[in-house]
């Protein structure tokens, strides 16, 4: 069973994404900030991370993505940014940090499912 980590400081968003992905055969994990995400990825080795950018704490989703993609033990993990930040510069920074996909909120649940299946299905 493939593992997916959902990272967002808003519980409602994490739950919405989890409900969206229930149609697939995935084990869903959650983290409420970027620091928790980095620790969870190192411990659980998920196949995919769905990462918010703007979260409270010492690091944001861009920084967490750079850390994960720069670590030989976690660099193979796929990361999709799911964020309200939709400017071209934000997309450039996300892909520059190593993101494999980028969705802006509000998002299409069907498009997210298709992207997840494309990446790890």
Image: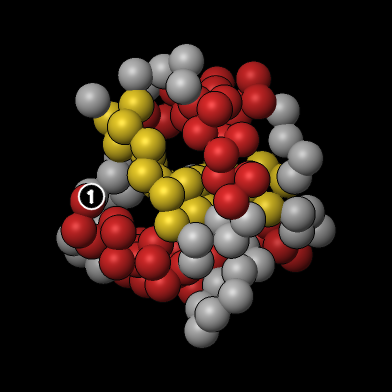
Please name the residue shown 56% across and 72% down the image.
60
Residue drawn 65% across the image and 25% down it: 109
Residue found at the far bottom of this picture: 58
Look at 49% across and 73% down and name the residue there: 63
What colour scheme has been applied to the protein in the rendered image? secondary structure
| Quadrant location of the N terminus in the rendered image | top left
- Residue indicated by mark 1: 45
Quarter of the figure with residue 75: bottom left
Q: Which part of the image, by quadrant, shows the C terminus?
A: top left
Q: Position of residue 50 (x, y in %)?
A: 50, 46
46 w.r.t. 84: above or below: above
Indicate whether 56 appears above or below 9: below
Estimate the x, y position of residue 18 in percent, counting from the top left: 51, 33
Residue 88 visible in rendering: no
Where in the figure is residue 46, as x and y percent of width and height? 29, 44
Q: Is residue 56 found left or right of 49 in the rendered image? A: right
Whether residue 76 sits left or right of residue 54 in the image: it is left
Residue placed furthest toward the right? 87
From the viewer's perspective, tell me whether residue 76 is left or right of residue 78.
Answer: left
Residue located at (54% from left, 80% from top):
57
Above or below 38: residue 119 = above
- Is residue 34 among the parts visible in the rendering? yes
Q: Secondary structure at mark 1?
A: loop
Q: Is residue 77 left or right of residue 115?
A: left
Q: Nearer the viewer, residue 17 or 74?
A: 17
Count of marks placed on residues: 1
Q: Quadrant of residue 90?
A: bottom right
């Amino acid at each position: 069973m493939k593992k997916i980590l959902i990272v967002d400081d808003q519980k409602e968003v994490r739950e919405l994404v989890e409900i969206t992905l229930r149609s697939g055969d995935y084990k869903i994990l959650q983290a409420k900030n970027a620091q928790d995400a980095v620790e969870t990825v190192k411990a659980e080795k998920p196949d995919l991370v769905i990462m918010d950018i703007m979260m409270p704490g010492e690091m944001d989703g861009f920084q967490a993505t750079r850390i994960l993609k720069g670590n030989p033990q976690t660099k193979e993990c796929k990361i999709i940014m799911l964020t309200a930040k939709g400017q071209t510069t934000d997309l450039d920074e996300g892909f520059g940090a190593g993101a494999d996909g980028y969705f802006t909120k509000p998002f299409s649940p069907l498009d997210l499912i298709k992207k997840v299946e494309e990446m790890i299905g």
